Image (cartoon, helix red, strand yellow):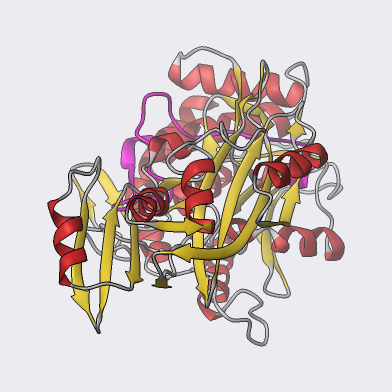
Amino acid sequence: MMKKIDELILSYQQEMVETLQKWIRIPSVKGDAAPGAPFGVENRKALDTAMADCAKMGFATQIIDGYAGHADLGEGDDYEALAILAHLDVVPVGDGWTVDPFGGEVKDGKIYGRGTSDDKGPAISALYAMKAVKDAGIPLKRKVRLILGCDEECGSEDMAYYKAHATMPRSGFSPDAEYPVINIEKGGCHLMIKGRQDGLKVLEMNVGERPNVVPGLATALVEGDEALVKKINDAQWDWPVEAKMENGAVRIDTVGINGHAAMPEHGRNAIGQMMLVLKALGAKGIVETLADKIGMTCYAENLGIAMEDKISGKLTCSMDMVRTEGEYISAVMDIRYPVLFNLEPAFTLMKTAMPDCEVVNLHSRPPHFVSEDTPLVKELLEAYHEVTGFEKKTIAIGGGTYAQSMEEGVAFGAQFPGEVEMAHQADEFLTLHSMFESTRIIARAIVRLAGK
């Protein structure tokens, strides 16, 4: 049975690449709402394209008002179906690309483009795993439902709407993180810190597009002259900093490294760099506070809320957006906190640490936990081990996935141990070998969890 499935997946490989290229070439970054397109016309186009491809393979499909869609394999109760949740939306391109971010270029065994690893590539693996099970004629005891959403990167409003207007299965997985099985997802919150600036006048600083992406470039316009430009360019900094005159003001650029806010230690935050530079040049008030309390830290060490527990690891903190508003500057923080962390007292501690600033909770979600003793987790680990031979274990992450939309949901793949994390980064890519191996793993998971 598995040999037949593997043979089918091998025969699909060229088609899988071409389908992923087609999906990558749709720039499905969240846009302005339009009729039938709550997350923008490109996201709706991506959804329509994916659902059309699912229908061509013989799956029963349905689009839920442009928020999400699903494709069903087999028959049975929707609530008891095995759910596979993936997303079609992507984060903005950002800086530092050397290839077309929406080109789907294949080179040296890799396919490049925004969304290849997060999350269109894994969605393709799930779709073709279902196709392999179907074409192999495997009898099923329960329905398998692939749900594709359009708003995972901006708060998962799509899944909230889906649950209100369709039946969300009780149990399943999302291939939107890493292997083996992620049964713990930290809680998360987006905080805005706002305060008055003083000292060196910052005229304009509008950096960052999303509160879950570590920015790799920050630009600020400040009051000053050629003497300030020379001072900046002659100084010894710990990272790339450059200054020049622009429209009668001094433009300062700091270069960092893009990354995912769930793992800020893997990037280098350009906003944090900028705050430290501005403080060194004489900026005070909110700038000095952000430099001292956050700066280049990743674990909220100076905010009074640093915390770690055994099952889910450290609290992380990333300063991902900053805006100037006249005499005021606001920054948006992305915090991922452990299962045992109490969010409410943390606000009091942060306000105490920054008494001259306004601290506002913009959005929060609780942690998510599924026992490693459930049949779902056990069978997923067996499917993973059967293909890879790697250790069967569960892990915790800071990222939040669609798994939280289900009563019993976990993240399962699609990044393998030892692979470079490319989500939200420049020149994002997915190796073709990994895509094909994930397809084999997911097909086995379907057979184990839904096969007769």
* In the rendered image, the vertical position of residue 134 relative to residue 98, given as above or below: above
Residue 223: percent from the left, percent from the top? 32, 73
- Left or right: where does residue 149 sit relative to residue 423? right
Magenta segment includes 171: no
Which residues fall within the magenta stretch? 405-434
Side of 334 where 24 appears, left or right: left
Residue 409 colored in magenta in the image: yes
Q: Which residue is drawn at 69% across and 50% down?
A: 355
Q: Is residue 9 left or right of residue 14?
A: right
Is 41 or 211 nearer to us in this picture?
211
In the picture, residue 227 is in which quadrant?
Answer: bottom left
Q: Position of residue 284 (x, y in %)?
A: 47, 57
Which residue is nearer to you in this view: 72 or 292? 292
Q: Is residue 3 above or below residue 9?
A: above
Query: Residue 87: x percent and y percent?
Result: 58, 55
- x then y, percent, for residue 244: 18, 69
Tell me, yes or no, if residue 294 can be seen here.
Answer: no
Q: Quadrant of the C terminus?
A: top right
Q: Which residue is drawn at 65% across and 53% down?
A: 190
Task: Please state, as top left, top right, bottom left or bottom right, where the N terminus lies in the image.
Answer: top right
In the foreground, 68 or 332: 332
Task: Let me know if residue 9 appears in the view.
Answer: yes
